[in-house]
Image (cartoon, grey):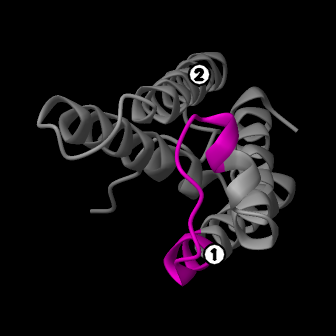
Amino acid sequence: MNAAAISVLVYGIYLFANGVGLLCAPNIPLGLLGLPPTQEPWVRVLGLVAGEVGFYFAFAALRGVAGLFRATVHARGVAGLTLIALMVLGLGPVQLSLFAAVDLVSAFWTHLAIRRSDAARPGLYPLKRQDTP
């Protein structure tokens, strides 16, 4: 498993664990973040989706689905910036900065790992875009 796959696997495990927590006992992670308890079903639905996406990330990393790695860099970057924007606009609590930081740092980690792989094996590593004539 290369460095890009490891970074995607770690992020997938993070997402999966957060998803399970929100699905099974949402008030525990909410309480750890200083947020009020809730009985709303949407928190559990979010947990289900986060866990599912985390599973996809881990599965792709373990199977070496390299094309997905680059896409996750962009998606996590946008997610991190969106969370910051929500916080700055007063549409979300300051705790969103924790999730934004994880998204941005992990995206940068994967980005660097992809660049190292591309540089080490030019033309051989499938993360580099390949245009066809």
User: Residue visible at 66% across and 43% down?
Assistant: 31
Image coordinates for residue 68, horizontal then vertical, percent: 56, 57
Indicate whether residue 126 is drawn in magenta: no
Quarter of the image where the C terminus is located? bottom left
User: Residue visible at 80% across and 48% down?
Assistant: 13
Residues drawn in magenta: 30-46
Query: In the rendered structure, which amino acid carries the disc numbered 1?
Result: Arg
Q: CA distance from mark 2 to mark 1?
A: 29 Å
Instruction: Find residue 62 and report its image quarter.
Output: bottom right
Q: Is residue 123 above or below residue 118?
A: below
Q: Is residue 129 above or below residue 80?
A: below
Comparing 4 with 20, the one in front is 20
User: Residue visible at 62% across and 48% down?
Assistant: 30
User: Is tag 2's residue or tag 1's residue first in the polypeptide sequence?
Assistant: 1
Image coordinates for residue 64, horizontal then vertical, percent: 77, 54
User: Residue visible at 72% across and 33% down?
Assistant: 7
* Crowdedness near tag 1: few (<14), some (14–19) or many (≥20) residues, C-alpha within 10 Å: some
Direction left: furthest residue: 89
Image coordinates for residue 121, horizontal then vertical, percent: 65, 25
Q: Is residue 98 above or below residue 53?
A: above
Instruction: Find residue 87 and report its image quarter.
Output: top left
Instruction: Find residue 100 and report its image quarter.
Output: top left
